[in-house]
Amino acid sequence: MVNAYLVRENDGLTLIDTMLGGSADKIIAASEVTGEPIVRIVLTHAHGDHIGSLDALKKRLPDAEVIISTRDARLLAKDMSLDPAEPQDKLRGSYPGAQAKPDRTVDADDRIGSLEVIAAPGHTPGHVAFLDVRDRTIYCGDVYSTLGGVATSAKVNPVMPLALFTWHRPTELASARALRALEPARLAPGHGKVIESPLEAMDQAIASAT
Ligand SMILES: [Zn+2]
């Protein structure tokens, strides 16, 4: 139901998202299989099912660098305020916050090792995706899910109704289009299996949300 990813870099592993609380042992065990340490923890957004094990992981991996977008860093700190220029829609979904403070905040076009930071707001105000420039895998967080078919979180999919937790659906749909325009070779979502050659499925998901 909920994914985290370990991405190999020259200096160790980048963990993308931390799943629900109680997942730290499982994530560390998976990293140990690779023989490489987790050197950084990057977050697509501040929802509870993506940051749930952050504090437990940071206790076990005190040297790992914690990275989140500048905008969702506020939500990680439980600051629920909206900027005047943002849509004044209600923030939806769980924002439990974390004690761990980001070591670094990032914005669109920043690089984290091989990962390019892609602005993908809508599900949350500061949601980001990560494009691995080596193989064009896009780690899309909750912009798309693939549970019960590829879908955006701009429209409710009965199997995985992520859109119920989406802050602003028009912005989310624009982000879904922006990720499609990058022509990823592989779609690695926060929920559901990884999809190879996903462009046609992404087009259909956009069409059905329009
Ligand atoms: Zn989410």
Image: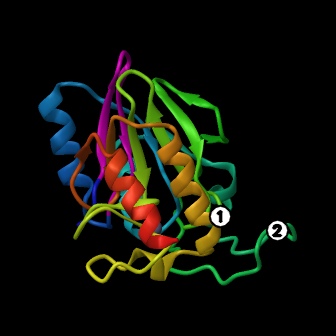
Q: What residue do we see at 50% from left, 37% from top?
A: 182
- Residue ID for mark 2: 83
Q: Quadrant of the N terminus?
A: bottom left
Residue toward you, 100 or 149? 149
What residue span does the magenta drawing correspond to? 4-19
Q: What secondary structure characterizes most of the magenta part?
A: strand
Give the colour scheme shown: rainbow
31 or 147, nearer to the observer: 147
Q: Amino acid at mark 1?
A: Pro
Task: State the SS at label 2.
Answer: loop
User: In this orientation, does residue 94 appear?
Assistant: no
- Up the image or down, 119 lies above or below 1; here it is above
Q: Residue at x 31, y 76 (%)?
A: 160
Residue at (48%, 50%) from the top-left corner? Answer: 43
**Percent x, y of residue 176:** 51, 56
Q: Is residue 16 magenta?
A: yes
Tell me which amino acid carries mark 2. Answer: Asp
Q: Is residue 161 left or right of residue 106?
A: left
Residue sitting nearer the eye, 47 or 11: 47
Depth check: give the residue in front, 24 or 47: 47
Q: Is residue 173 left or right of residue 12?
A: right
In the image, what residue occupies the spot 65% across and 64% down?
A: 125
Above or below — where is 75 with respect to 158? above
Label 1 SS: loop
Q: Which residue is mark 1?
A: 125
